[in-house]
Image (tube, rainbow, N blue to C red):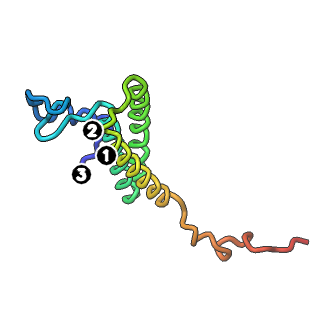
Amino acid sequence: MPTFTPEDRLHERDASPAVQDDVRGGSIVVSGGPVPSALLRHYEALDCASEEMLEAARAGDWDSVCRLEGACALVISRLQSLARQQPLPPHEQRERMRILRAILARDAEIRRICEPMPSLLDATAWPLASPTTLH
């Protein structure tokens, strides 16, 4: 499966089917749905990247995890700048929250994969973990 950077995901939408001429409810329509704002497209790019990071972590591909993490930092920086210039429209807030919850859940799973299992840290594995008397 090809790996895309979050920046690739941002441009993927721009290369999608041509914009239709009509406007419905104040939104431009692209083959079946409204075009999300630039800000929401940044959130969507992070959502895709977090999915890829989790897949890479599950596969033990830490180089890809690190590469995607760096790419996400750039997208987050752009997202913050864009959010200061133009806030997310109210009708996109629900999708933003769904994306943020999914990213947080994936991040927690990646952290669980990265951290050693607590069951390995018992008293038999760590001789100094049990109380000892030094003379």
Tell me if residue 126 comes above or below residue 19 in the rendering.
below
Residue sitting at x 9%, y 29%: 22
* Label 3 close to label 1 by CB (< 8 Å): no
Task: Kindly state the secondary structure of the residue where label 2 is placed.
Answer: helix
Quadrant position of residue 35: top left
Type of the residue with mark 2: Arg
The tag earlier along the polypeptide, 2 or 1, is 2
> Mark 3 sits on what residue?
1
C-alpha span from label 2 to label 1: 8 Å
Residue 135 in percent (x, y) is at 91, 72
Which disc, if any, is residue 9? Answer: 2
> Mark 1 sits on what residue?
48
Residue sitting at x 28%, y 34%: 10
Tell me if residue 134 comes above or below residue 9 in the rendering.
below
Q: Nearer the viewer, residue 123 or 79?
A: 79
Q: Residues within 10 Å of mark 2 (few under 14, many from 20)?
A: some
Farthest residue to the bottom: give it.
124
> Does residue 118 appear to the left or right of 40 in the view shown?
right
Q: Residues within 10 Å of mark 1 (few under 14, many from 20)?
A: some
Task: Kindly state the secondary structure of the residue where label 3 is placed.
Answer: loop
